[in-house]
Image: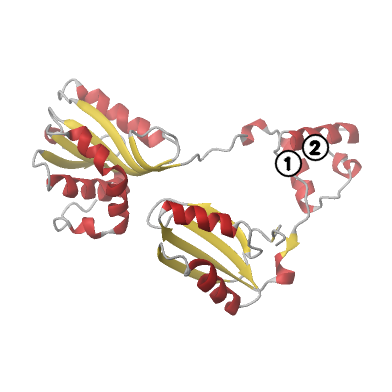
Amino acid sequence: MQKNMPKNTLLNLKPIQKFIEGVGKDIKRYFGKDRGCVVGLGDDGFIYGLGIYQWMSQKNKNINFTAMDDNGKDLEEEKIKGRKVLIVDNDIISGKSYKRAMETMRARKEGLKIKDIKFAVLCDRTGLADFSVEGYSAYAPWSLERLDGLDLKIIQALSKDGRKSFVDIAKGSGLSPVAIKNRVERLIEDEVLKIQGLLNMTKVYSVSAHIEIEADQKTIDRLIEKFEKSPLVYHLVRTSGRYNLMVSIATPNLESIENFIAKEIRLEPEVKHIEVHVGELPIIPKGWIPPII
């Protein structure tokens, strides 16, 4: 970890500004006038934690900063002794790193007389953090662990040919066509499997673009509503970090990409910044269902 950085330079970075705007008031309220320590977790957490420390130290001179990995390596224990602790990271995805870090800190709580321990992140996908700017689930309601090998083979067969008969799928499976039919119906009923027609992208389009967008939440919601109706958009996802929306489009030519950006994105006054990556048609997916306008 790079631990020698010019003072307050991180406060000029937009991701740090976004982090402070989102959780700064909560963090300030947490520390109050007490002595505290910001602990950056890992490489990303080091940057975000140092940014929070630089911001807090302007208002509270009783704030320290240190860093550690989720097992406590590199932690300067004298800096957290007798203080409130705030562990900072960029993202909680599975929660494993969060749990290890919290267990590491709690194991030191009594010996170092730590007053309290909280956790702050930019994006919390699990709902574990005390303070977070964004939160969304990283988990599907159906786990692949609940699908056995035959289920996966059925899905694979139908993904290649949605009209494949139960008789053909049953061959070599050890099951009867009726058993295959029952499995398919169960998968459809559980909304795990959907059989539908897809547009072959290679026959209609020739180029694609991946566009990252930074905007306020209301603008993002408005863009999502608009993009969901676009016949060019085949991938749309909210993200954490500087850019909070990613949209992928497929078009017949480069001019169509320019028109899409000009008319669908740049006309939105609250869009702060965009980054565009133009390339060939996607390797995956090769087909999708464009909405009918």
Indicate left or right for 231 with 34 as reference: right
Relative to residue 58, is residue 231 depicted above or below? below
Relative to residue 166, is residue 83 depicted above or below? above
Disc 2 marks which amino acid?
Val
Name the residue beneath numbered marker 2: 184
Upstream in sequence: badge 2 or badge 1: 2
- How many numbered discs? 2
Label drawn at residue 86 = none
Q: Are marks 2 and 1 in contact (CB under 8 Å)?
A: yes
Q: Residues within 10 Å of mark 2 (few under 14, many from 20)?
A: many
Disc 2, SS: helix
> Residue 157, how many percent across, how many down?
79, 47
Residue at the spot 34% in from the left edge and 31% down from the top edge: 100
Rendering quarter of residue 165: top right
Front residue of this view, candidates 197 and 78:
197
Instruction: Name, please, the residue furthest toward the bottom.
Output: 255
Label drawn at residue 193 = 1
Residue at the spot 71% in from the left edge and 33% down from the top edge: 190
Residue 154 appearing in the image? yes
> Residue 265, how many percent across, how many down?
50, 66
Residue at the spot 15% in from the left edge and 23% down from the top edge: 113
Disc 1, SS: loop
User: What is the quadrant of the C terminus in the image?
Assistant: bottom right
Residue at the spot 24% in from the left edge and 38% down from the top edge: 27
Indicate left or right for 48 with 278 as reference: left
